[in-house]
């Protein structure tokens, strides 16, 4: 059989195709040359055939890059490869232009509606429906656009609501939620708070915060590193020597603890009282923490500071004390009921980094109060580890020299929520129900806190008077861990605060709230 006859027989065996080809077959229109060949064969054989896909010509040289192109000159292939752009076949349909594979315009080609079209929707839903878009697709696209716009509006609203830290502080003052007060200002703090401020101030001044047992090791280190230990002078060591003021106090019967009354003692501490606060760290331990703080200064983030410096400092200062505990509480949110009732312009969920709490010696006395509470927590947070452990001291940390106003606002809101919870607990005992603050009526004077900015440790305190006016007393710097001296001061400061927690706050809490 001759070759042409074999070809004609093979073509005749192909089944006839329907008159209406599928959309897939219509996807690529034939070129002018291919159309002419196909029409000749169809006329000879008398049947229709499927449209063959275009052949890729690898020998054709690549087109040079197009710098600019008019809409009417874009090929259908270019339109299909960029579906993200608005479909421009409308203009082609009106002008009747069509391009072949070589970019030549075929003026004899019948204008066709493109099979694949990408609808273009305006950024916002339109009341005029496009005839090329189905109602379902239009609704979905509109809802997606509306959702994205709403999300952007919500983000912008949150940014407006949060505002700058200074704005947050001013709004809190305008509302009377937390009013700023200066520890060293004209206004005198309440007496009980002023006693603790006196102890912290003497510590900050460098008086008697290291037990005399550590003096030999420190003075020996001073011989080899005089610049590093130039602060090691006589006043920093607490020695066993009575003061005239204490001798006078012993003859009277005032009942005032000498170390807490700045007008009655001429020395900050003696060896006995310093030992009562807690152990003074050894030189090796102090140097270890000092080196950790110096490393943290070289690019550590806040979390790394907390892990490398601040938590080990808590362990060094309070690890010996079985009556108090400490924990990280960055994941402890405020109970919504006790968050300050401020305007929507301020975020209410403020947390702190650490807290120092009571370790109850008889947990069974606390648990009934926990179970009676709607939040099932003794505190103003429902954090599981603190459900039955009364929080006494809050600690907020920031990087060196950063975000003081933010830290102040966080601590202010946290302590206000804590006071609200104490008001609720006291009120549930039937005490001070006619007062604005039942806790004030029951004798609560202040709640202390510490704000740490890298190396710098500062004492602050929260008070509320009988009229409900809340004040955050700021600030008393008491330690700077750029030096080894600052490590000793930070440890002594934490021990002073834990003594207040054991000897003043916990007895009040047991009597007033637990009824013990």
Image (cartoon, rainbow, N blue to C red):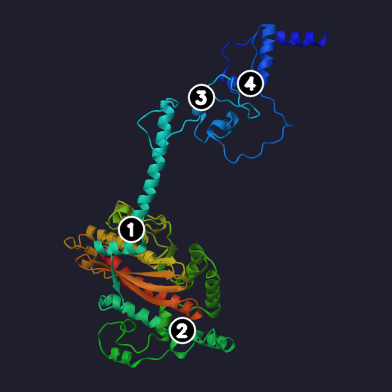
Q: CB of mark 2 within 8 Å of CB of mark 4?
A: no
Mark positioned earlier in the residue sequence (3 or 1): 3
Q: CA distance from mark 1 to mark 4?
A: 76 Å
Mark positioned earlier in the residue sequence (3 or 2): 3
Depth check: give the residue in front, 417 or 294.
Answer: 294
Mark positioned earlier in the residue sequence (3 or 4): 4
Q: Position of residue 131 (x, y in %)?
A: 42, 25
Element on which disc 2 rests:
strand
Question: For this view, does 460 lie left or right of residue 321?
Answer: left
Question: Closer to the observer: label 1 or label 4?
Answer: 4
Mark positioned earlier in the residue sequence (1 or 4): 4
Q: Can you tell which mark lies on residue 93? A: 3
Question: For this view, does 479 lie left or right of residue 163?
Answer: right
Question: For this view, does 342 lie left or right of residue 401?
Answer: left
Query: In which quadrant of the rendered image does the N terminus lie?
Result: top right
Crowding at label 4, few (<14), some or many (≥20) Cα neighbours within 10 Å?
some
Query: In which quadrant of the rendered image does the C terminus lie?
Result: bottom left
Crowding at label 2, few (<14), some or many (≥20) Cα neighbours within 10 Å?
many
Crowding at label 1, few (<14), some or many (≥20) Cα neighbours within 10 Å?
many
Element on which disc 1 rests:
loop
- Pointer 4 residue: 30
Q: CA distance from mark 2 to mark 4?
A: 98 Å
Residue drawn at (33%, 54%) of the image = 161
Q: CB of mark 3 within 8 Å of CB of mark 4?
A: no
Element on which disc 4 rests:
loop
């Amino acid at each position: 059989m001759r070759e042409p006859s074999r070809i004609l027989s093979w073509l005749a065996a192909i089944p006839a195709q329907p008159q209406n080809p599928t959309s897939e077959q219509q996807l690529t229109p034939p070129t002018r040359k291919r159309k002419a060949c196909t029409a000749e064969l169809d006329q000879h054989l008398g049947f229709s055939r499927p449209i063959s896909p275009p052949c890729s010509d690898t020998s054709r040289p690549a087109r040079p890059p197009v710098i600019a192109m008019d809409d009417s000159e874009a090929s259908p292939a270019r339109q299909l490869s960029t579906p993200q752009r608005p479909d421009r076949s409308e203009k082609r349909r009106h002008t009747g232009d069509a391009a072949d594979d070589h970019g030549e315009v075929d003026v004899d080609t019948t204008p066709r509606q493109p099979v694949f079209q990408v609808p273009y929707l305006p950024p916002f839903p339109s009341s005029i429906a496009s005839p090329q878009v189905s109602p379902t697709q239009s609704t979905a696209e509109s809802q997606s656009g509306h959702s994205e716009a709403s999300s952007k509006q919500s983000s912008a609203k949150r940014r407006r609501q949060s505002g700058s830290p200074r704005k947050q502080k001013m709004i809190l003052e305008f509302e009377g939620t937390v009013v700023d007060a200066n520890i060293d200002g004209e206004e005198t703090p309440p007496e009980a708070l002023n006693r603790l401020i006196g102890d912290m101030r003497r510590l900050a001044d460098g008086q008697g915060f290291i037990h005399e047992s550590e003096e030999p090791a420190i003075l020996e280190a001073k011989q080899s590193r005089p610049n590093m230990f130039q602060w090691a002078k006589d006043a920093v060591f607490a020695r066993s020597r009575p003061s005239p003021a204490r001798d006078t106090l012993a003859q009277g019967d005032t009942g005032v603890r000498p170390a807490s009354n700045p007008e009655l003692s001429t020395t900050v501490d003696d060896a006995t009282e310093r030992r009562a606060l807690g152990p003074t760290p050894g030189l090796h331990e102090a140097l270890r923490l000092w080196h950790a703080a110096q490393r943290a200064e070289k690019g550590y983030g806040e979390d790394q500071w907390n892990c490398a410096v601040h938590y080990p400092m808590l362990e060094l200062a309070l690890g010996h004390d079985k009556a108090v505990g400490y924990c990280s509480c960055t994941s402890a949110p405020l109970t919504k009921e006790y968050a300050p009732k401020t305007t929507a312009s301020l975020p209410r969920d403020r947390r702190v980094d650490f807290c120092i709490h009571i370790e109850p010696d008889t947990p069974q006395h606390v648990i009934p109060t926990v179970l009676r509470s709607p939040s099932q927590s003794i505190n103003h947070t429902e954090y599981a580890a603190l459900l039955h452990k009364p929080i006494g001291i809050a600690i907020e940390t920031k990087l060196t020299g950063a975000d003081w106003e933010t830290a102040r606002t966080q601590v202010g809101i946290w302590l206000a929520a804590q006071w609200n919870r104490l008001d609720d607990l006291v009120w549930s005992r039937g005490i001070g129900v006619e007062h604005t603050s039942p806790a004030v009526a029951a004798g609560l004077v202040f709640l202390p806190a510490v704000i740490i900015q890298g190396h710098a440790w500062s004492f602050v305190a929260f008070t509320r008077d009988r009229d409900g006016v809340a004040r955050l007393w700021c600030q008393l710097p008491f330690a700077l861990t750029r030096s080894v001296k600052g490590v000793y001061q930070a440890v002594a400061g934490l021990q002073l605060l834990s003594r207040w927690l054991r000897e003043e706050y916990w007895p009040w809490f047991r009597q007033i709230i637990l009824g013990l």
